[in-house]
Image: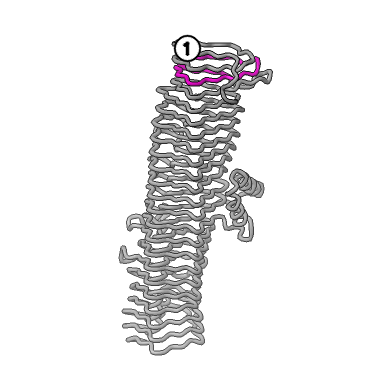
Amino acid sequence: MQAFVLFQRKCQSFQSSTFSCKSLEPDQWLFLNVTGVSFNTSAWATWDVNLGFANCQMETLVIWNVGRNKSNKEIHLHIKNSNIGSSVVVSDGVVTLENSSFHFLDFPDNLGVFSVTNGTVTVISSEVIGFQGHVFMRLTKGQAYFVDVLFMDCVFFMSAIYVKQNSSLHLQNTTFISNTGCLVRVMNFSVAIFSNSVLKNNTKPSHFGCYTILGGAGGSILWMKNSIFTNNRNFIGPLVAVLDRSVSVIQDSDITNNTAPHIGVVSVVSNMFLIFLRSKFSSNKGKAVAVESCSHIGILDCLFQSNNSTYAASIFVGVVEEMPPENKQEVKKMLHILGDLDYHFKRTTRTMLQTWFGSHQGEKCLISDCKFTDNTGGAFGAFNMSVVLHKCHFVNNTVFHHASSNSKGQPTGGAVSLGLCRANISECTFAQNSAEHGGAISADGGTLTVSSGVFTKNQVLMTKSSSGGAICIPSDISYLLVRKCVFLGNKAQNSGGAIMVVESTLVIVEESTFQDNWAQHGGAAFGESTFQDNWAQHGGAAFGAFSKIGNSSFNFNNADTDGGALVLIDQTSIWSSNFSHNTALNKGGAIHCYAILKFFCTFCFFKNNTGMDG
């Protein structure tokens, strides 16, 4: 509808009066400076009609069936610079609200102030304050645009905005502050996009219907970009929940100081995929992100800082599902839709397509170029899935002694905890992380490949049994491969200053450096590597069940009891390696074999190794 000009009929300066009609003539109606009026039209228009309200202070505005009638005629409603005290608009047409306010006291009807079907609503520079009721807007097969809108001090028993079916909701520069209840609920193949918006100090009570503040389900898209989500609270569930074959995107946003101790701040369950890009998750109580049964995951260039949870404070990912071929095509289609919605997002969609369906097909979870710092409860946890961590930094993350196992009973690493995973960690740094077992990484079952990584001053000193200053393998896995890594100054109270491995594990370490690591048993680890100046009670360089040691050098390692360089507890093959100037105060100046059935050593060189008994 155009601006309020050229109206043929004008009604001005109503005072405590009532205007009602059953049908409207083919005109443009403008109501100016109306005060205390009750306006009611409850029948279809018989001609095309434009209704305008400007500079009005109305107690009640009731307009039924604004929109297209059986004769294909329309009513367009435009409200400007007005204050409406208690209103109902049930619309199938075009509604525009501009610079208006809605100060509601009580609105029990669950239809909502706006119930839009096959129509469009635009709300501009307006405010909704003190509303109490089930829902403010219900959108079905329609479109809604909110620009510069404020929702404040409202109570929503169902949801502020309920996007019900095949609809789209766009919120730009919209603020939700100090509200109670669910704010936006997106269902059944609908889209909700938050852009440059703020959601602050909102609360979800336990007795309200929807169990989250923002929710998406049924093949929907929930997208937050350039927005702030801070100081929101939900003590019974997540703050953001995206479920059932839906898509969640958080881009260039700040998720800070939220409280959701059960499940997590952002919970994603049975999704097609999620993408988090260039966003900050900081000082949240409860997991920042909890993912269960999601087909594809991409988290790129994000910061996770000072989050607090008993386990995996920043990210937990569990059971990435294999989807049928027809759903894979749906994922590709949805990625292209996201790229079309935002031109700058196209590059990210291409990256995800290449990762999920390209040369690395099968790597369903990609976390790249992220920083994890000062998180309590560990930084990242995963169970029964394939995961890639690439160019990430983990600094000063901690798991306390009383939280040293997750819900499945697995030991938790100070930075990364893996259970039955197929994990590939490349070009990552781990510094000053701590836990009871696995100061940097704990991996229980599955496979683990670590390449081109740097592990510095990680430690496990909480109990006498603490093991694996940098990496702990507490049970049998298919294999552990460490290649081109550096381990400096890591410490363990018991075994494995750098790496602790239990028996019957295939372990290969190549082209790596171990220096100044410390433990009671096994100061470092092994492979085509350099071991220098490590100290241990047993096994100055390494302690554990090692399969292959080749092209390695063990120099100037020391043990207070056995194995100046190595203590071996399972069948081991060593070839083309040098052992020099290693010292043990008891058995095995270079190598001590403990209950090994077979030990092979070929083309090895031993020089100036010292032990009291061999």
Residue 58 within the segment the image draws in magenta = yes
Where disc 1 sits, the SS reads loop
Vertical relation: 220 (above or below) 365: above
Q: Nearer the viewer, residue 303 or 182?
A: 303
Q: Nearer the viewer, residue 141 or 148?
A: 148
Quarter of the rendering containing residue 10:
top right
Classify the position of the C terminus by image quarter: bottom left
Q: How many marks?
A: 1
Whole-percent x, y for residue 204 in the image: 40, 36
Whole-percent x, y for residue 196 in the image: 49, 42
Residue 533 within the segment the image draws in magenta = no
Left/right of residue 480 with respect to residue 401 in the rendered view: right
Vertical relation: 171 (above or below) 505: above
At x 44%, y 58%, the residue is 371
Quarter of the rendering containing residue 83:
top left
Quarter of the rendering containing residue 536:
bottom left
Q: Nearer the viewer, residue 96 or 610?
A: 96
Q: Nearer the viewer, residue 613 or 564?
A: 564
Q: Which residues are magenta?
A: 37-64
Residue furthest to the front: 6
At x 66%, y 49%, the residue is 325
Left/right of residue 329 with respect to residue 497 in the rendered view: right
Vertical relation: 253 (above or below) 63: below
User: Looking at numbered disc 1 in the image, what kind of residue is underneath it?
Assistant: Phe
User: Which residue was labeled with disc 1?
Assistant: 14
Crowding near the residue tagged with mark 1, few <14, some 14–19, many ≥20 C-alpha atoms within 10 Å: some
Vertical relation: 234 (above or below) 293: above
Residue furthest to the right: 71
Q: Does the magenta stretch mainly form a helix, a strand or a loop?
A: strand
Classify the position of the N terminus by image quarter: top right
